[in-house]
Image (cartoon, rainbow, N blue to C red):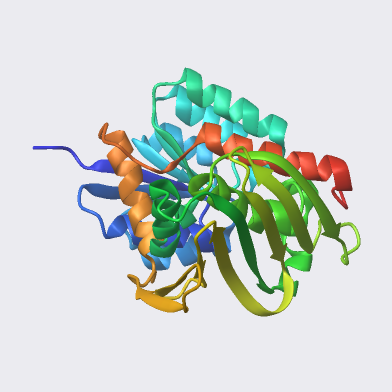
């Protein structure tokens, strides 16, 4: 009989509860513990986790006493290095929430620790598992419409509440909307179209002492595709859109359940997709388990995630970090 994977959680906020839901839907997983310094976060997590898992305020104590075989780390980016190093040294597998770290230097240290260690370490770039994103990746790879010319992406919406959240505090998150939201965009770029070769940006700051509320990036991939990426916490309406232009056609996706496609000289048509509806988290969790089992997996590696941090760092060097 195969023993269940003993899963712990470091961080008990909203995103941790999304991961909890995803893992509870998979066989062979036992949630054994969770840790968060905030009593309110722990109380909310307890409501969904039930009475079984042990509760801790200190993540290092949780690792030592509950002895999970894998953990999901979703604590703020500036607080992850010690926890990860302790888990890696103990041979504990880790799914780290995005971005990998709040600075490129920290991300590189984490990736180096992962390279030297024996566990399985992946990063929660969950858009890799959105059905429409995966279909776009397939079309780029098959090459039936020729070379990819451009990739345009916007992620944003009315989220001014982040003005007082740690996610806009550069000392904790590393910046603002670019590192928190735009990191997903840049991982989508490398997943769909390949690594970034050149990147430049402009940032907008409206909250004193805080990171950018909006960012716009232009650049190119190593294959020559041009990029235009926007992330914003102040758009009047939610927007999640990706558009690809090939030599012989176009594809657009707005995170609904259809892909819009148009061949050169033709009319737009819709192709039905599986609705996301939590699929991205459940399939990411399954990909983590596959990697632990030694099976192929498209979950983001620490090395890929560190590259995203480095691309973002280049834009911050060019434009500044705001309140940092």
Residue 213 picture quarter: bottom right
Q: From what the image shows, is residue 168 above or below residue 289?
A: below
Q: Which residue is drawn at 25% across and 34% down?
A: 293
Q: Name the outermost residue toward the top.
A: 116
Q: How many labels does the image show?
A: 0
Q: Residue at x 60, y 53 (%)?
A: 149
Q: From what the image shows, is residue 208 above or below residue 76?
A: below
Would you say 88 lies left or right of 5 here?
right
Would you say 161 lies left or right of 256 here?
right
Q: Which residue is drawn at 61% across and 49% down?
A: 186
Q: From what the image shows, is residue 265 above or below residue 171?
A: below
Percent coordinates x, y for residue 122 in the rendering: 45, 39
> Is any part of residue 49 visible from this angle?
no
Percent coordinates x, y for residue 190 in the rendering: 55, 44
- Return the residue nearer the eye: 250 or 9: 250
Q: Name the outermost residue toward the front.
A: 265
- Return the residue nearer the eye: 298 or 107: 298
Q: Name the outermost residue toward the right.
A: 208
Would you say 238 lies left or right of 89 here?
right
């Amino acid at each position: 009989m195969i023993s269940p994977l003993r899963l712990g959680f470091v961080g008990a906020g909203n995103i941790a509860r999304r991961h909890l839901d995803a893992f509870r839907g998979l066989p062979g997983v036992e949630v054994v513990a969770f840790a968060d310094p905030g009593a309110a976060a722990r109380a909310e997590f307890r409501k969904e986790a039930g009475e079984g898992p042990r509760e801790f305020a200190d993540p290092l104590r949780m690792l030592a006493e509950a002895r999970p075989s894998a953990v999901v780390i979703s604590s703020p980016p500036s607080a992850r290095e010690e926890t990860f190093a302790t888990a890696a040294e103990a041979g504990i597998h880790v799914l780290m929430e995005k971005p990998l770290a709040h600075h490129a230097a920290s991300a590189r240290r984490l990736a180096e620790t992962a390279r030297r260690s024996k566990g399985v370490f992946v990063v929660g770039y969950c858009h890799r598992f959105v059905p429409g994103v995966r279909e776009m990746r397939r079309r780029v790879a098959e090459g039936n419409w020729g070379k990819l010319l451009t990739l345009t992406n916007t992620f944003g919406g009315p989220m001014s509440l982040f003005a007082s959240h740690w996610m806009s505090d550069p000392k904790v998150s590393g910046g603002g909307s670019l590192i928190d939201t735009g990191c997903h965009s840049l991982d989508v770029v490398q997943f769909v179209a390949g690594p970034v070769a050149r990147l430049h940006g402009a940032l907008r700051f409206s909250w004193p002492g805080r990171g950018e509320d909006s960012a716009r990036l232009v650049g190119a991939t190593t294959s020559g595709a041009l990029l235009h990426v926007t992330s914003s916490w102040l758009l009047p309406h939610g927007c999640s859109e990706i558009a690809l232009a090939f030599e012989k056609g176009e594809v657009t996706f707005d995170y609904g359940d259809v892909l819009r496609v148009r061949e050169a000289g033709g009319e737009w048509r819709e192709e039905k997709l599986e609705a996301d509806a939590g699929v991205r988290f459940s399939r990411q969790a399954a990909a983590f388990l596959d990697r632990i089992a030694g099976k192929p997996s498209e979950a983001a590696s620490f090395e890929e995630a560190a590259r995203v941090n480095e691309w973002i760092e280049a834009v911050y060097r060019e434009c500044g970090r705001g309140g940092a």
